[in-house]
Amino acid sequence: MTKVYLNKKITQRIASGHPWIYNNEIDRIAGTVEPGDLVEVYFFDGQLAGRGYINPNSQITIRLLTKHRDTIDAAFFHKKIATAWAYRKQLGYVENCRLVFGEADELPALIIDKFNDYFVLQTLSYGIEKWKPAIVEAIQSIFNPKGIYERNDVPVRELEGLTQIKGFLSDPFPTEILINENGLQFYVNIETGQKTGYFLDQQDNRRAIQKIVSGADVLGAFTYTGTFEIHAAHYGAKSVLGIDISETAVEQANKNAALNKLDHIVKFEAMNAFDVLKSWGKEGRKYDVVMLDPPAFTKSRNSIDKAITGYKEINLRGMKMINSGGFLVTSSCTNLVSPELFLDTIDMAARDAKKRIRQVTYQSQSSDHPIIWGMENTHYLKFLIVEVCDR
C-alpha cells in the first residue's frame, strides 16, 4: 500500500479526524498511484493518520476509510454496512431510512437509501465506485432485498472522472415503490424522482406540523410530491394547496393525495412558487400556515450571498401571506448556509415584512442522517417553525 505524507502544518480539521484530504495538504506520495487505489496516510511526524482511497484527479485527493490499519476488503464494507443498519434499527428506522450517510457512517461518498425491501445506491467518488460490487454483495447478504438500483446520474461524479449512470444492480423490478410514513402511504419512483426518489431527511419534521395545521388553511410551496401537504391534510387541516413548478411532481402529489383519500382536502397545481408568492401576496391572499421547502439555492461558496437573498425573499413573501397568529414552516437544505446564518436570514425577513416571530421548533434532518461535529456537510438541513404576528 503506497504511503502518503501530509504537510507539517495541517488544518485542525485533519488533526480532528476529518476524512477529507486535499491536494495542497499533501507533502509527498512515496510511490505511484492510480485513481481509486488504497493508500496509507501519515502525519508529518510519522504517526498514522489512517487508510483510505486516493484520486489524484479529484479536488478531494484522499478520503479516509479508517484511522487504523484495518484490512480494507469486502468484509470491511460488510461490517460497516451492518453497523450502520444496527444504528438505524436502534433508533426505530426499520422500514425507510438513509442506511448509509457517507462520512457520517465512515464510508465517504457512499449513499444508500432503504425503501422497505428496496435499496437505492450512490457511489459518488472513484474510490468508492471500485468497491461497488462488494457493497452490493453486502446489501444482498444482510437484507436479501427485492431489488437494488443505482442513481449515479449526478454531475459530481464527473469531477471524479466518472460517468453518470443509473440502472439496476439486481434483477429488474418495478421502480415505483409504495412506502409507509407516519401512518400515510406514498408512491416513490426511484428511477425518475429527485435524488434517490424521496426526501427521507424530512420524515421526522413532517410530524412536527401536526398541532399547528389542525383546522387551518394551508399553503405549501416547492412541494415536490406533496408529503408535507398530505401530512397537513392528515393532521386535520381545513384546506391545503400545494404548488410546484414540476408538472410531473404535481401529478405524483395528486396521486399520493388520492392514495390516502385526502384529495378532497389537498390539491396540487403546477406553478412557479417564486412568482406565485409575489403575486398572491400583492393580491392580499392569506393563509393560516405557509410551508416553504425549496431546493438548495447554491452548491458554491461563491454564490452564498445570492442564496441568502433568495431565502430571505421567499420567507418574507411567505410571512406577508400569513394571518396574524399563524405559522411559517420553512427549510433550507443548503449545507453551505450555516444554521446561524439561516436563522439570521429568517429574522431579517421578519423585520422587513414588519412581522413579529416566535420560534416554535427548530430541528435538523432525521436521525438516520447523523450529524458529525466538525463535518459541516453532515449538518445540512435546517427546519424551522415560527409563529408570525403583526407588529
Image (tube, grey):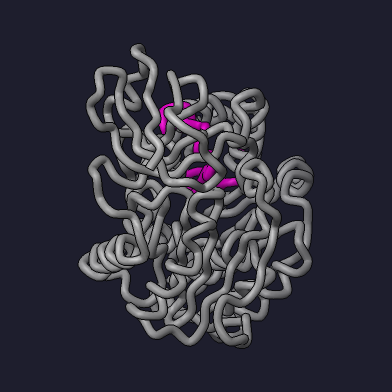
51 up-or-down from 176: above or below: above
| 156 or 217, nearer to the observer | 156
Residue displayed at 76% across by 57% down: 245
| 231 or 211, nearer to the observer | 231
174 up-or-down from 370: above or below: below
Quadrant into which the N terminus falls: top left
Is 332 within the magenta? yes
Q: Tell how many labels.
A: 0
Is 64 within the magenta? no
Q: Residue furthest front?
A: 31
Specify the quadrant of the image occupied by residue 229: bottom right
Specify the quadrant of the image occupied by residue 205: bottom left
Does the image show residue 191? Answer: yes
> Which range of residues does the magenta coloring cover?
320-342
Name the spot of residue 58 as percent of width and height, x first: 59, 36
Residue displayed at 66% across by 80% down: 255
Name the spot of residue 28 as percent of width and height, x first: 44, 22
| 230 or 104, nearer to the observer | 104
Residue displayed at 42% across by 51% down: 102
Quick check: 6 left or right of 123? left
Name the spot of residue 298 as percent of width and height, x first: 63, 36
Quick check: 277 left or right of 257? right
Residue displayed at 56% across by 62% down: 217
Name the spot of residue 14 as percent of width and height, x first: 34, 27
| 318 or 84, nearer to the observer | 84
Q: Residue furthest top?
A: 9
Quick check: 137 left or right of 372? right
